[in-house]
Amino acid sequence: MMKLRSAARTTWAAACVAALGLVGTAATAAPAAATAPAGTTSLASVLAADGDTFDRNWYDFDVVDQAVAAVLKAKPDSPVAVLADGTVPLTAFLPNDRAFQLLAFDLTHRWERTERGVLDRIAGAVGVDAVEQVLLYHVVPGATIDARQAVRSDGARLTTAQGATFRVDVLSRWVPLVRLVDRDRNDVDPFLVRSRLDLNRGNVQIAHGISAVLRPLDL
């Protein structure tokens, strides 16, 4: 499978032209940052930092990293390549590998024991176009939303690069305990993972780990 770092390097220029058109649809309900971040390290670099490969740690982000790579291999002009352009502001909500393992089981009723098997099973069940749409549903373009802002955004509806929205439901500002309510009403909604907040802080592209895969439709 093509690695995200090399795939993004060769495709981001064309894809970001399309992705920039999405910036105008960014979340209007998110509060403005007190001090705008200036760094331009991309989230692609962050995702590839642990070696750009699958491993046995189910609580990092290898599956989402390799899913982006798979989409770019099949669709070099996909807007998911915006993750490699650190000058484009966005916020990504990243499901960990365990979250994708649970999604694979939900889709196929088979429990995969390797990260590679999880991605292969999901891609085989829904196809690369659906994987692309799911990935874009985790990206809020045009807004750098840090954890402090997120816990002050109860009720906000965030517009994603996929075009659909999800809602921020703050259950506690002090813990913090923040749920993201997606468009699948029949399944468990993800929570922000406290130990995985503000990934890539200080840069215009920021990410937060989440406990389940956001679903842009009823699966």
Image (cartoon, rainbow, N blue to C red):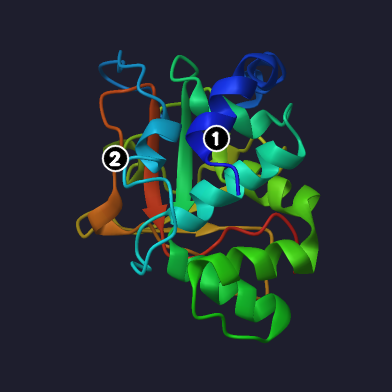
| Vertical arrangement, residue 137 with respect to residue 118, above or below | above
The disc placed on residue 198 is 2
- The x and y percentages for residue 122 are 68, 66
Residue type, label 1: Val
Q: Is residue 177 left or right of residue 163?
A: left
Q: Residue at x 64, y 23 (%)?
A: 11
Which of the marked residues, 1 or 2, is nearer the chain's N terminus?
1
Tell me the quarter of the picture where residue 72 sits.
Answer: top right
Q: CA distance from mark 1 to mark 2?
A: 14 Å
Location of the C terminus by quadrant is: bottom right
Q: Is residue 192 visible to the viewer in this orientation of the structure?
A: yes
Is residue 185 or residue 101 the one in the foreground? 101
* Left or right of 38 on screen, residue 117: right
Q: Residues within 10 Å of mark 1 (few under 14, many from 20)?
A: many
Which residue was labeled with disc 1?
140
Q: Residue at x 44, y 20 (%)?
A: 86
Q: Residue at x 50, y 67 (%)?
A: 115
Disc 2 crowd, CA 10 A, few/some/many (<14, 14-19, 20+)? many
User: Do callouts 1 and 2 mark residues in contact (Cβ within 8 Å)?
Assistant: no
Which image quarter: residue 16?
top right
Task: Give how far across and how far down residue 63 sits, in percent.
Answer: 51, 57
Q: Residue at x 53, y 73 (%)?
A: 101
